[in-house]
Image (cartoon, grey):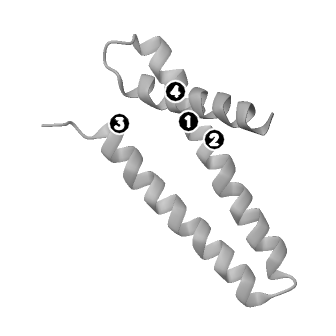
């Protein structure tokens, strides 16, 4: 059961990523797909920040570690988004 669930989610996620990059798919389909991808990654990064803030109350070093991971992931996500969707490919 776990394998089927993982397979379906991976198929949907990878399909969404590939479809959002394809120029042959109409813009009114691609843009919502890009929005879904952005919301998913923002939710994951926001959860990491939330865990960091909650963990900060118990352990300062652990909280700073999780917040630093969240900042790193946010910066790298912005860079990857710019490379994939905003910058023109030569």
Label 1 SS: helix
Label 4 SS: helix
Label 2 SS: helix
The image's mark for residue 85 is: 3
**Does residue 6 appear to the left or right of 88 in the view shown?**
right
Q: In whole angstroms, how far apart are the C-alphas of marks 4 and 3? A: 14 Å
- The location of residue 16, given as percent across then percent down, is 52, 27
* Residue under pointer 1: 37
* Residue under pointer 4: 16
Residue 34 drawn above or below residue 81: above
**Does residue 39 appear to the left or right of 54 in the view shown?**
left
Q: In whole angstroms, how far apart are the C-alphas of marks 1 and 4? A: 8 Å
Query: Do residues under tags 4 and 2 come within 8 Å of each other at their CB atoms?
Result: no
Query: Do residues under tags 2 and 1 come within 8 Å of each other at their CB atoms?
Result: yes
Residue shown at 53%/62% (left/top)?
Answer: 73
* Residue 1 position by quadrant: top right
Q: Residues within 10 Å of mark 3 (few under 14, many from 20)?
A: few
Query: Do residues under tags 1 and 4 come within 8 Å of each other at their CB atoms?
Result: yes
Residue shown at 31%/19% (left/top)?
Answer: 23
Query: Do residues under tags 3 and 1 come within 8 Å of each other at their CB atoms?
Result: no
The image's mark for residue 40 is: 2
């Amino acid at each position: 059961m776990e394998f089927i669930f993982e397979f379906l989610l991976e198929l949907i996620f990878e399909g969404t990523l590939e479809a959002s990059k394809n120029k042959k798919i109409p813009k009114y389909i691609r843009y919502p797909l890009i929005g879904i991808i952005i919301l998913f990654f923002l939710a994951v990064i926001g959860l990491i920040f939330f865990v960091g803030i909650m963990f900060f109350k118990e352990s300062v070093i652990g909280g700073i570690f999780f917040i630093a991971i969240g900042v790193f992931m946010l910066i790298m996500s912005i860079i990857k988004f710019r490379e994939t969707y905003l910058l023109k490919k030569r």
